[in-house]
Amino acid sequence: MQGALEGLGYLARPVPTPNVRAFQTGKEYGNNGQCNPTYFTVGNLVQYLQSLEAEGMSKREIIDRHVFFTAGACGPCRFGMYEAEYRLALRNSGFDGFRVLLFQQSGGLSQSDTEAGMEMNLDFFLGILNALNCGDVINEVGYAIRPFEANAGDTDRALNDSMDIMHEVFRGKRPWNLDSGMAKYLGGFRDTAEYIGKFVKQLKGEDYVPHLRRCRDRFNEVEIDRLRVKPIVKITGEFWAQTTEGDGNFNMFNFLQREGAQVLVEPIGTWIMYMIHQVVQKYKDLKGLDEGAVLPPIWKLGTRARIEWTYRQKVAKLKLAEAVFKASTTRLWMRWAASRIGWPINTSCSALGTRSTTRARAEARAIWKWPRISITRTRTWRTWCCRSSHSGACLRRNPTARNRPWFRTSRT
């Protein structure tokens, strides 16, 4: 990644692997009650900036000349709060205003929250993606060979040489751009043509393959003994702890290898594949559900029938899932309400979920017989509760409770 950023014209330097001192620094300047990965990563940044200050740089010079680039995410999990934790720790440690840039999980090619200092365009993302993939491959090969090496340390030396080779390759690579003579003839289509050209270059180009073959040949020089029996141990669990190599996971990888295991590490590419899967699944779920979508011509009966079948099948599944969710929520809510006001709770309350599910299946089957209908709620969930209670599913032992004003709900 350092080489990819340098190839784009930036001055880049990787932050050292977090250690226990970084963990203690994170606890000192960060929020209380955070998890280990937060303390390690946040404290590691503060510790690195303090080391720059100890070398003679002023805090203003550090803030003006440095930008911290890291991964980020959305959502309520702590991974979505890393940026706030970084800024809090930087402010508490005296580096208020230090720029933190995130490679957002949800932003894609449009990182709207970026600050001045880095241009996150297509060349930027392709460079980072290629660096991650090449790093994953080299790292995984190293872990596959190390347990069987005949001479201790040969694999690590081959790994370092391979990293140096690929670093120089990424550092010397320049982004692909349209020729100036061709660009002037394209006019307004220049940006589109350049985007297409970059993707074609990414898919068809061989900028990295010859150099990866050099790395392969370097690993082939390591003498190995495949007759050794090694148990295979897969590292899984929390994302950061299963990928870091140091005090963050108590040096787990080195410990397992010293104990005679072959370690299967988790590649960073798993996270990339997860993001791609989310986008693909989203379009699969929504495909055919847009009322404004243009259908094929009338003479393509087979295509139109397939689209219609897929659409109604998805609608039926959504209706069934919505009704089952309502039934389970209503069952729990009625049990809670009955316990609060002292009504006897019938042990056959599970029949409510069964009846509601049966009704939902009937509604789903009815979709096939009628034209497309919109998936909207026609009754509130309290009305569902009222209708179910009138059927005698939950209040069978107390018939007079049906006339209480609490059950007088109206349709929305």
Image (cartoon, rainbow, N blue to C red):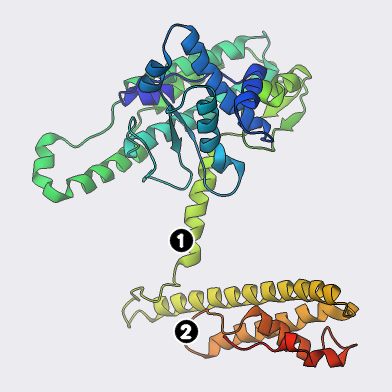
* Residue at the image point whose x is 41% and y is 12% from the top: 58
| Quadrant location of the N terminus in the rendered image | top left
Residue neighbourhood size for the residue with mark 1, other residues' Cα within 10 Å, grouped as few (<14), some (14–19), many (≥20): few
| Residue at position x 86%, y 92% in the image | 399
Q: Position of residue 212 (x, y in %)?
A: 45, 24
Name the residue rendered at 74%, 30% in the picture.
232
* Residue in front for this viewpoint, 374 or 188: 374
Provide residue 412's location: percent of width, then percent of height: 56, 85
Question: In the displayed structure, would residue 77 be above or below residue 247?
Answer: below
Q: Identity of the amino acid at label 1?
A: Tyr
Given residues 356 and 179, the one toward you in this image is 356
Q: Residue at (75%, 22%) from the top-left corner? A: 256
Residue 39 vs 344, above or below: the answer is above
> Is residue 96 left or right of 171 when viewed as pictured?
right
Is 361 left or right of 189, judged from the image as shown?
A: right
Name the element at disc 1.
Answer: helix
As measured in the structure, the alpha-carbon distance from the residue carrying label 2 to the one carrying label 1 is 20 Å
The spot of residue 200 in percent (x, y) is 31, 42
Question: As shown in the figure, which amino acid type bears the numbered disc 2?
Answer: Arg
Quarter of the figure with residue 101: top left
**Secondary structure category for the residue under label 2:** loop
Q: Mark 2 points at which residue?
A: 372
Give the x, y percent position of residue 123: 32, 35
Q: Earlier in the sequence, mark 2 or mark 1?
A: 1
Q: Can residue 26 be seen in this view?
A: yes
Tag on residue 283?
1
- Neighbourhood count class around disc 2 (C-alpha, 10 Å): few under 14, some 14–19, many 20 upward: few
